[in-house]
Image (cartoon, rainbow, N blue to C red):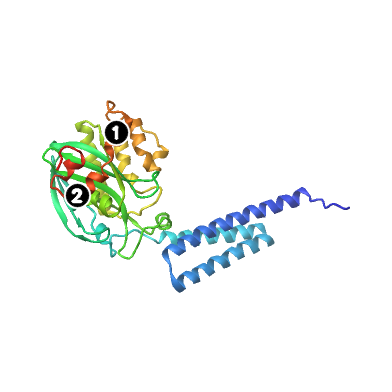
């Protein structure tokens, strides 16, 4: 029985072609995914046909002459990247009503003026009595910082919020969120491919916490953070700076690099300026463990007790009291 012996040069050519094929497929898959996010109908089908033609051309030319194949791939990649760079973030869209306004800040000494603080009275998860307000805060009265986690499905992933409390009873929450247009729903694919902008929402706790506990049916936990006065002030100002940056220059949301962990990253830096990047900054449901590692919690409270005390969903969902912030912290009872 005769056996076919394949020469090493032939095997090398086959392996190189397979490698080229994988690169072409990868580039085409990236481009196709981006196109399906931004185009629909005839424009999408036309664009997909162009991608298919370019892919086949790359492979065909590569079989005839290596350099021609790579040149075609390079030109196709440049065209794809060039189109993608034309997608720019904007403030001028028909936004969903809950992310219509990005908070803006003015600082005059110790007094901070916030424009467009959200204080909605929610009726359902998608309807509310709308109220955007102007509020003033005295930095000399900044007394507490709390981190809130809100889990809607996978416990490894949580939305993150930071709440600031003042000795005069005022409370304001900052939340970095996806800025969706009125017709849009969030999807993971769009979060990777420039479908959504990024927005910093400042809101009352009765608005933003109750929305999550009562209407979105999320599990919310509240963790007091141990910071001194200078750290609290520095952290608060960092959010004001972020607010003004986003108000001045729009930015895209990204599922990995620009998401709600943007809210907590400054917190971690204030606790430990030389902090190392950690997987829990992405797997945000585990962020309380990371904050504990950095020394951000009261060391006198056992971990199990802290976790139990953090559970505020039942408290938050059962009250409309003007003393809502005190109630969810168990400082008073109704």
> Would you identify the image quadrant in which residue 149 lies?
top left
Q: Which residue lies under the disc numbered 1?
A: 306
Q: Can residue 287 be seen in this view?
A: yes
Q: Relative to residue 184, is residue 133 depicted above or below? A: above
Image quarter (top left, top right, bottom left or bottom right) of the C terminus: top left
Residue name at image x 28 percent, y 65 percent: 94
Decide if residue 198 is on the left or right side of residue 1: left
- Foreground residue among 141 and 105: 141
Q: Which residue lies under the disc numbered 2?
A: 206
What is the x, y in percent for residue 171? Answer: 17, 44
> Would you identify the image quadrant in which residue 248 lies?
bottom left
- Foreground residue among 127 and 229: 127
Badge 2 vs badge 1, beta-carbon distance below 8 Å: no
Q: Please, what secondary structure does the residue beneath circle 1 have? A: helix
Residue sitting farthest toward the right:
1
Q: Relative to residue 332, is residue 101 depicted above or below? A: below
Q: How crowded is mark 2: few (under 14 residues within 10 Å), some or many (20 or more)?
A: many
- Foreground residue among 290 and 140: 290
What is the x, y in percent for residue 22? Answer: 60, 54
- Foreground residue among 42 and 331: 331
What is the x, y in percent for residue 157? Answer: 38, 45
Residue name at image x 19 percent, y 38 percent: 330
Q: Residues within 10 Å of mark 1 (few under 14, many from 20)?
A: some
Q: Please, what secondary structure does the residue beneath circle 2 have? A: helix
């Amino acid at each position: 029985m005769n056996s076919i012996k394949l020469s090493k040069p032939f095997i090398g050519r086959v392996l190189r072609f397979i490698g080229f094929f994988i690169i072409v497929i990868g580039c085409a898959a990236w481009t196709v995914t981006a196109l399906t996010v931004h185009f629909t109908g005839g424009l999408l089908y036309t664009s997909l046909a162009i991608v298919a033609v370019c892919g086949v051309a790359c492979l065909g030319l590569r079989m005839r002459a290596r350099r021609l194949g790579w040149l075609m791939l390079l030109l196709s990649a440049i065209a794809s990247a060039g189109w993608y760079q034309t997608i720019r973030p904007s403030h001028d869209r028909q936004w969903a009503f809950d992310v219509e306004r990005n908070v803006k800040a003015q600082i005059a000494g110790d007094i901070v003026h916030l424009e467009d603080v959200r204080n909605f009275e929610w009726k359902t998860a998608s309807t509310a009595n709308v109220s955007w307000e102007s509020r003033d805060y005295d930095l000399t009265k900044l007394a507490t910082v709390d981190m809130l986690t809100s889990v809607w499905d996978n416990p490894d992933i949580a939305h993150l919020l930071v709440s600031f409390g003042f000795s005069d009873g005022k409370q304001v929450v900052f939340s970095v969120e996806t800025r969706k247009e009125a017709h849009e729903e969030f999807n993971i694919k769009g979060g990777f491919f420039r479908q959504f902008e990024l927005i910093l929402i400042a809101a009352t706790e009765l608005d933003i916490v109750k929305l999550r506990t009562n209407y979105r049916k999320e599990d919310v936990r509240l963790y007091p953070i141990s910071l001194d006065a200078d750290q609290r002030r520095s952290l608060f100002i960092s959010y004001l700076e972020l607010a003004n940056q986003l108000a001045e220059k729009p930015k895209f949301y990204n599922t990995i690099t620009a998401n709600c962990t943007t809210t907590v990253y400054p917190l971690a830096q204030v606790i430990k300026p030389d902090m190392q990047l950690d997987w829990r900054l992405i797997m945000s449901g585990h962020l309380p463990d990371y904050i504990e590692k950095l020394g951000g919690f009261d060391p006198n409270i056992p971990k199990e007790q802290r976790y139990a005390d953090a559970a505020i969903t039942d408290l938050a969902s059962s009250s409309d009291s003007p003393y809502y912030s005190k109630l969810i912290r168990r400082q008073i009872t109704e």
